[in-house]
Structure formats: C-alpha cells, structure tokens
Amino acid sequence: MNIILIGAPASGKGTQAVKLAQKFNLVHISTGDLLRNIASEKSDLADEIHSFIDNGKLVPDELIIKLVKEHLNKIDQKSGILFDGFPRTVFQAQQLEKFVNIDYVVEIKVSLESVVKRICDRISCSKCGRTYHISQLKGDLCECGAKLQKRVDDTEELAKDRYQVYYNQTYPIVEYYKNFKGYHSVDGEKSVDDVFEQICGVIK
Ligand code: ADP
C-alpha cells in the first residue's frame, strides 16, 4: 500500500506519517528530512540544497525526483511507502506515477494562522526530524538522543512564505488528485489522535 500525505508546512504530515508507517508497516519517506540530511554534509549539492530550503523555496523538480528515485533503490520498501512532502508539484506527481502506484492521497487541511503559530512554537530534532511544542520541552535533547534546535526555515516570516509556496505550487496537486478514488481530505486542526483516526478511517 502506497500513500501520499499532502499538507501545508506544519500541518502535521510528519507526525501522522510516523504513526501511519508504524501501524501499516510502511517505509516513511520525508523529502524534507532527506534534503536536510544531505545538506548537513559538506558538498556542492549540500550548498545547492541550502540555497533553497533555507529560504523556504522548493528545490528544483528534477533534483528531488532524482534523489527520491535513488533513495527508493537503496531501501527495503516493506509493505509499501508513505510519502511525506513528496510530490510537491503537479510535475512531481506526474513523474511519481511512472514509478510507483499510489493507493491513497490524504490531504491534511490547516489554516495559515495555525501554520504560523505551530511553526513559531516548535523545535525540531537535528537528526530524526521529530518536532516538539515548546511547552513540552524537558531539556534540549530529542528522545533519540540528538540535539533539538530551531530549523532555519522555522521563522514567522518564512512560515508565511512557505504557506504561500504551498498554495501556489503544491495545492494544485489537490485539484489534480481530486477525482482519484483514493483521494481524501481530513481536518488537521484537530488533535494528533483525532487526525490519526480520521486518516485510519479512510485507509482500508
Ligand atoms: P515543511 O512541510 O514543514 O515545509 P519539509 O521538511 O517537508 O517541511 O520540507 C522542508 C523544505 O524542503 C521545503 O520548504 C523545501 O525547500 C524542501 N522540500 C521538501 N520536499 C520537497 C519536494 N518534494 N520538492 C521540492 N522541495 C522540497
């Protein structure tokens, strides 16, 4: 079973992806984490990736498609794949269809106000990408042991820019998938458990 999660920055895609991957034994592919991992090493590619992600812009389609294909070739695909943050443009969606059959596309809906608030109030693990609300913090380490830090793109200004990028470049894929029988939309303003239940309710 292959699933795509679509949603604005901080819509809860990453949190839901971890839970879904565990429940359905899927391999979780977060293109944001993939890019941040490559960008954390010293290389020309890392510099190129930084120039986009640190400014809230999407990396070019050709580059992300190449990285996703390379990654898929390296991993054990378990019972399926959970795509978190990919595809992010209609072109990426069209290319993905050529190498993976998608069963479900789930859109997590949230407002701009929630996105900005969540981004300003969250801190992320530098290694596994897990996010914590600042009110939950008990120290500066993630449960995985790595250091927590504010992502460079998690500022109020870039949150608004990223939401705009989402609406201009990613939201058109909702239209693209709307007539697809596996497409569902859930209310992302609810609690983590509620959103998870909504998603599980549409995945058979
Ligand atoms: P968020 O959903 O909170 O914006 P992600 O971790 O999914 O965070 O993505 C962080 C950044 O990585 C994006 O702003 C973008 O620059 C880049 N990125 C991730 N996935 C893609 C993709 N499929 N295509 C292009 N750029 C991407």
Image (cartoon, rainbow, N blue to C red):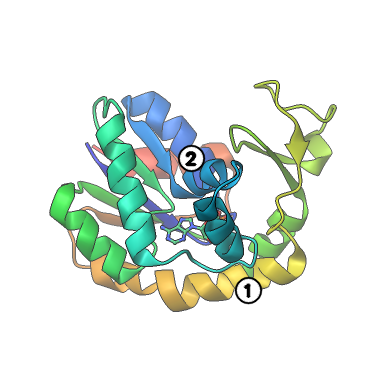
Q: Estimate the x, y position of residue 42 in percent, counting from the top left.
A: 60, 44
Res. 28 mark: none
- Which quarter of the rendered picture does the C terminus lie within? top left
Q: Amino acid at mark 1?
A: Asp
Horizontal relation, residue 1 to residue 42: left or right:
left
Horizontal relation, residue 49 to residue 117: left or right:
left
- Picture residue at 63% right of the left edge, 73% below the top: 161
Q: Write down the residue under mark 2.
A: 16
Residue 107, quarter of picture: bottom left
Q: Estimate the x, y position of residue 111 in percent, counting from the top left.
A: 59, 67
Residue 79, quarter of picture: top left
Q: Are marks 1 and 2 in contact (CB under 8 Å)?
A: no
Number of marks drawn: 2
For label 1, being within 8 Å of ligand 1 is answered: no
Q: Is residue 11 above or below residue 171?
A: above
Residue 87 visible somewhere in the drawing: no
Crowd band around label 1 with a 10 angstrom C-alpha radius: few (<14), some (14–19), many (20+): some
Q: Estimate the x, y position of residue 76 in percent, counting from the top left.
A: 28, 25
- Picture residue at 76% right of the left edge, 48% below the top: 150
- Which numbered mark, 1 or 2, is in the foreground of this view? 1
Under circle 1, the secondary element is helix
Task: Decide which of tag 1 and tag 2 comes sooner along the chain.
Answer: 2
Q: Is residue 166 above or below residue 38?
A: below
Q: Estimate the x, y position of residue 8 in percent, counting from the top left.
A: 52, 62
Residue 146, quarter of picture: top right
Residue 168 visible somewhere in the drawing: yes
Q: Is residue 184 above or below residue 33?
A: below
Res. 161 mark: 1
- Picture residue at 75% right of the left edge, 66% below the top: 156
Under circle 2, the secondary element is helix
Distance from label 1 to label 2 (Cα)? 23 Å
